[in-house]
Amino acid sequence: MAQLTLTSTDLSHVTADALVVATASTADGVVLVGADALPGGLRTQLTRSATALGLTGAVDEVRRVPTAGQLAAPVLVLTGLGEQSATPSAEALRRAAGAATRELAGTASVALALPADAVTELAAVVEGALLGAYSFLRYRDGAAAQKAAAVATLEVLTPLARDAAAKTAVHRAEVLAAAVHATRDLVNAAPNDLYPAAFADLAKAAVKGTGVKVSVLDEKALTAGGYGGLLGVGLGSARGPRLVRVAYTPSRPAAKVALVGKGITFDSGGISIKPAAGMEAMKSDMAGAAAVLQTVVAAARLELPVAVTGWLCLAENMPSGTAQRPSDVITIRGGTTVEVLNTDAEGRLVMADGLVAAIEEGPDVVLDIATLTGAQVVALGNRVSAVMGTDDVRAEVTAAAQASGEQFWPMPLPDELLAGLKSKVADLANIGERAGGMLTAGVFLREFVGTTPWAHLDVAGPAFNEKSAHGYTPVGGTGVGVRTLLTLLEQRATTGRRKK
């Protein structure tokens, strides 16, 4: 991750390879924002040349212009905030900073002179800049890797460079960005490298030095524990399933939170095989487990006074002579039987095992996150995730998402959908009617949480960006959910909300 420093140096003396300032759009054209310290001649030149340069100040617009010796930095970068406002929102600042650092891949050092006079503004700029400065180069070498390399050094100009609260906010942004980057790395990894056992080993490595405890259940332990969902989904693969528990336990915690993540390291659909087109993106079907792991690590690094236990439900869903079949009946931990009508509805099976295990430990609240249904993408698209569950927890997740800059939309869990999950031979079927498929999956999971406050986060579309990069979001793994979950944990640290 990029090395970041704060400075109160005048922007005219900044010696970075590129200096970033903001633009905004108005009815009369584009304006520079917070760039009064630029030389007057350069400001005038930019304003007069705005049309020729294609400047509009729109969101995600990034333009580079030479400074021709008018600044110590050789290149001036103009990044758009969108429509002008008296005070740019935190998310507008995140996106503007992130779009700039993302576009500047291959540049060694970048300085940002965006609005950062208040701690909230500074935190947003730093967070966005760090999130945008990301590259996945594991499988690249030579010139291609050098050209795509993320910005190595970031310098943020602010009058708060020596302020204690600002330094605390920057530390939090650095921990958060590191967690998002690590989540993206896991999602982007090739499935021949990231299989359940390998994921479990990486979890052990990720928690070193944090005080987080890790335990791993292999096939033998899963069989002894009655984890029929994980075992059933993993039957078709030569690489067996795992259930990984990662636990951060501070002294005298204000709350006890359980997180459950779907970790299908590759989803072929099993016997109910998926179409070939687009199947390569199914390496991302473990994005929920990756987000859970890194959220727990971030909570530990920030030393939050909240006990957090993460459950990574890891399996590879493959077709073979040993794979589970449509009409097989499996038994989830705790005894509920499920008729498997479609082997491509596997995520809810491993998540059911994880939810039961999590709730056995008596958390105040349980949150699960999964790339669970294609119906989520149909309903909300590729940038908006869904949240379902207990009314107050669903509202809590939505508020945390809004505060963190992620988009989650509250969805219902209609009771009448449970009838569609009736099986002729078992307690439940794993699929219901096609209509409302995202909600039906949520209703299925609800059967395994009992009275525990709960929310289900479906991030199927937003977890993996197959289109063009935007803002601080790269192509590939996005790390969605980490920011929302960590913000919720921070809020729980303040409000407590322990079970009576």
Image (spheres, rainbow, N blue to C red):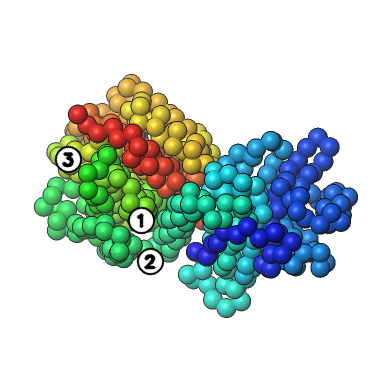
Q: Residue at x 61, y 46 (%)?
A: 117
Question: Does label 1 or label 3 sit earlier along the sequence?
Answer: 1
Q: CA distance from mark 1 to mark 3?
A: 26 Å
The residue where tag 2 is placed is 192
Marks 2, 3: nearer the viewer: 3
Q: Position of residue 479 (x, y in %)?
A: 46, 51
Residue 301, disc: 1
The residue where tag 3 is placed is 360
**Tag 2, which secondary structure?**
loop
Q: Residue furthest bottom?
A: 142
Residue neighbourhood size for the residue with mark 1, other residues' Cα within 10 Å, grouped as few (<14), some (14–19), many (≥20): some
Q: Residue at x 73, y 43 (%)?
A: 24
Q: Position of residue 148 (x, y in %)?
A: 60, 67
Question: Does label 2 or label 3 sit earlier along the sequence?
Answer: 2
The image shows residue 58, relative to residue 189, as above or below, that is above
Q: Position of residue 425 (x, y in %)?
A: 18, 33
Confirm whether residue 288 shows in the render. Answer: yes
Q: Residue furthest top?
A: 416
Instruction: Name the image quarter holding residue 456.
Output: top left
Confirm whether residue 95 shows in the render. Answer: no
Marks 1, 3: nearer the viewer: 1
Residue neighbourhood size for the residue with mark 2, other residues' Cα within 10 Å, grouped as few (<14), some (14–19), many (≥20): few
